[in-house]
Amino acid sequence: MRWLFVADLVMDSVIERPRYPKPKASTGDGSPNIIAAWGGAAWDHQNQVMYISGGGHGDAHECETGIYALNAAQLQFKRVVDRAPLDMVQSWDYAQGKIVPQSMANSSNMPLRHGVPASIHTYDGLVWIPPGLPGAGSVAGGLFYPGNARSIVNLDRAQYATAHWFNPLKDSANWSYCTAFLDGSAIYGPHDSFAHFKFDLNATEATDWSPQSLGQLKFNAFSSSTALPYANRAWTLLRERREQVSLFGNATGIRVRHGQALDAKANNWTSYHDRLSLSSSDGAHLDFNPTSLADDGVLANAGMHYDPARSCLWVQSNAENGPLYRIDGLDGNNWRVSKQLGPAALLGHPHGTWGRFRLARLGGADVALRLSSTTDPVQVLRLA
């Protein structure tokens, strides 16, 4: 096994020109930060399409709201949603306590003037929504965009629903290192380890932006006396198992069986947390340590995807020439790590992968896809 570049398959080719500036510098091309600034991706597991969007917070412009699709079967990029015009920018001025029509480096993630959420670091917060759910298109489905100004994007019409936004002086929450996942007709996610939110797609709610914002948000919907570390860790969703896992510390981790908790209508998820330990015959489990999992470490926010066909996890190091790991034994609480011989990442990424490492079926073979920047080709690896 080894990673290969797909010649000429570069996301930069579908990003609009002229390029928007970085608001911190008011000049230069901010588009590489769609990915470089903690930009994430959602995965359409039905059609094998990766949806990428992000940047913001002063690294990419607030109006850099384009959504880009990587179709795994066709090995093609496509721009699904155009970016917002620059004159749509606005900000919340904390000193004045009001909205101002100018860029303030997106510190509070205001909706733009036409109601579209401003570009932010998306982390693991982008979620693909299948057709048939509110806000989703009947063919391509939808996309949940995270942040204080969250929204649903109809991917068929390339339109954002009315932004679900609250006044940041009253109702904002810390969305740094955010994650989210879909279960049934609601989107859930932890932030700050203990606080959990529920975003019900079947409801609407009056917010500071609109009396009929799509989705109803509830913070602290579930309590737990056991944290699920989300910063300084490797995290992934095991969608088919309705579980999630965080690996952190010295070869340790936590699994949350959120599907069982939701089915039981549990308000406290403590008993649905399992403490995990890692072991190996080749010493590979020792690579999962506080240094490698610290912020911007070689395994922090690394590419990590559940493989239901093999009942294992694949984990790709962030470092250039970093190894690929396979983790087995997921039914128990002692998971076995093995370092795969041969494959090594062609490019590094200091800020992690955030959903841009995915498994797909291509030409009758199981492959891994890895997207590390807007300007470098997509990387593929045929799995043994």
Image (spheres, rainbow, N blue to C red):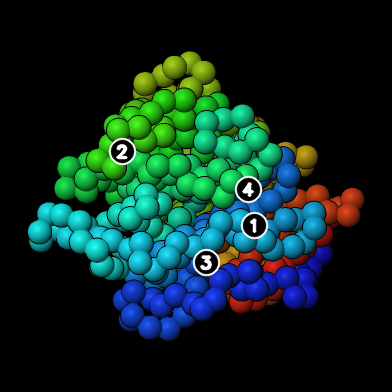
Q: Nearer the viewer, residue 58 or 283?
A: 58
Q: Position of residue 323 (x, y in %)?
A: 66, 66
Q: Is residue 48 above or below residue 60?
A: above
Mark 3 Cα within 10 Å, few/some/many (few <14, many 20+)?
Answer: many
Q: Is residue 316 above or below residue 166?
A: below
Q: In the rendered image, which residue does mark 3 sit on? A: 35
Amino acid type of the residue that numbered disc 3 sits on in the rendered structure:
Ile
Task: Kindly check if marks 1 and 4 are in contact, taking CB atoms under 8 A apart as contact.
Answer: no
Mark 1 Cα within 10 Å, few/some/many (few <14, many 20+)?
Answer: many
- Asked if residue 309 shows in the view, the reply is yes
Q: CA distance from mark 2 to mark 1?
A: 29 Å
Amino acid type of the residue that numbered disc 1 sits on in the rendered structure:
Ala
Quadrant of the image containing the C terminus: bottom right
Q: Earlier in the sequence, mark 1 or mark 4?
A: 4
Quadrant of the image containing the N terminus: bottom right
Q: Position of residue 344 (x, y in %)?
A: 70, 70
**Which secondary structure lies at badge 2?**
loop
